[in-house]
Image (spheres, helix red, strand yellow):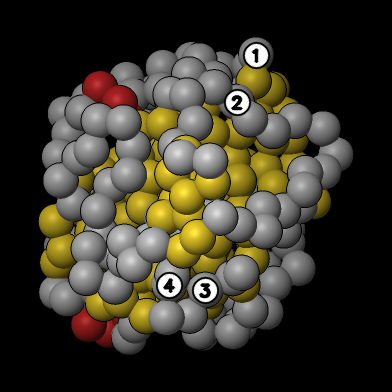
């Protein structure tokens, strides 16, 4: 076993991604966000999916977005009500908004997983809410944003903090039940991964490590930070 300067842990010849930091969106007033081109990969349809990441919020706003498909919440997750609610949007409608226990300046793992028309929302390993859901997300023409809701709508909805290990999986729901084991190492490029921002390198920290890498556009200087959850 050895650590590579390129951010990989080599074990018996098999490379594994190693996280070395996070994406820094602070301050929210600087309107820093990432954007990716429209793709059918974001259109999860009525099928299974998993979106997960680690988040670190430096202050609480009215509603701060982790990601959003388009500018009308076609598929989005935000944190609201002083950081104590997760809002899940599909096709412009808020469908779930579980209460969570959250404070600033702490890392939390968050996962949204749909399996066989049941949606599960996890906050730091606890199932905060689950319920029936078969919403058909078909938007394959809108830009996918990370760190904001609408880049043209002001900076009040921008993410005030750090994000790392953002993974978007279309076709596989990884988590179900009352709890999950919070990952203690970098998320990997598992089957059906469409986007993986593992932040493995301070230079190429916006590189997509999925099987079919996408171009990530850095808007207004999202920065690298050595802060990480493990």
Spatial CA span between label 3 and label 1: 33 Å
Q: Which residue is drawn at 17% across and 76% down?
A: 221
Q: What element carries label 1?
A: loop
Foreground mark, 1 or 4, reads 4
Q: Is 210 in front, or is 101?
A: 210
Give residue 64's position: percent from left, percent from top. 44, 67
Q: Is 160 in front, or is 53?
A: 53
Q: Note whether 129 is above or below 137 in the view shown.
A: below
Image side of residue 96 versus residue 59, left or right: right
Q: Note whether 210 is above or below 134 in the view shown.
A: below
Q: Which mark is residue 116?
A: 1
Q: Which mark is residue 173?
A: 2
Q: Is 204 in front, or is 122?
A: 204
Give residue 75's position: percent from left, percent from top. 40, 38
**Quarter-of-image position of residue 174:** top right
Spatial CA span between label 2 and label 1: 9 Å
Q: Residue at x 31, y 31 (%)?
A: 211
For the residues bearing labels 3 and 4, Cβ distance under 8 angstroms: yes
Q: Which of marks 3 and 4 is nearer the N terminus?
A: 4
Q: What element carries label 4?
A: loop
For the residues bearing labels 2 and 3, Cβ distance under 8 angstroms: no
Q: Which of marks 2 and 3 is nearer the N terminus?
A: 2
Instruction: Give the residue number, with chain letter if any, for mark 4.
Output: 21
Q: What element carries label 2?
A: loop
Spatial CA span between label 3 and label 4: 5 Å
For the residues bearing labels 4 and 2, Cβ distance under 8 angstroms: no
Instruction: Give the residue number, with chain letter if any, for mark 3.
Output: 228
Spatial CA span between label 1 and label 4: 34 Å
């Amino acid at each position: 076993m050895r650590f590579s300067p390129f951010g990989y842990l080599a074990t018996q010849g098999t490379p594994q991604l190693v996280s070395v930091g996070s994406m820094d969106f602070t301050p929210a007033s600087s309107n820093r966000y990432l954007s990716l081109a429209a793709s059918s990969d974001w259109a999860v349809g009525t099928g299974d999916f998993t979106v997960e990441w680690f988040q670190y919020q430096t202050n609480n706003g009215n509603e701060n977005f982790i990601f959003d498909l388009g500018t009308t919440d076609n598929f989005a997750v935000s944190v609201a009500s002083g950081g104590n609610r997760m809002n899940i949007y599909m096709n412009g409608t808020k469908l779930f908004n579980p209460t969570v226990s959250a404070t600033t300046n702490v890392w939390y793992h968050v996962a949204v997983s749909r399996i066989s028309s049941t949606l599960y929302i996890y906050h730091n390993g606890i199932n905060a809410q689950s319920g029936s859901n078969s919403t058909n997300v078909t938007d394959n023409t809108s830009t996918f944003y990370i760190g904001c809701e609408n880049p043209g709508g002001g900076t009040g909805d921008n993410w005030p903090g750090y994000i790392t290990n953002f993974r978007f999986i279309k076709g596989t729901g990884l988590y179900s039940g009352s709890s999950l084991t919070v990952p203690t190492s970098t998320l990997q490029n598992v089957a059906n991964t469409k986007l993986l921002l593992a932040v493995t390198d301070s230079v190429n920290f916006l590189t997509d490590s999925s099987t079919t890498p996408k171009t990530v556009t850095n808007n207004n200087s999202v920065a690298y930070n050595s802060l990480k959850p493990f």
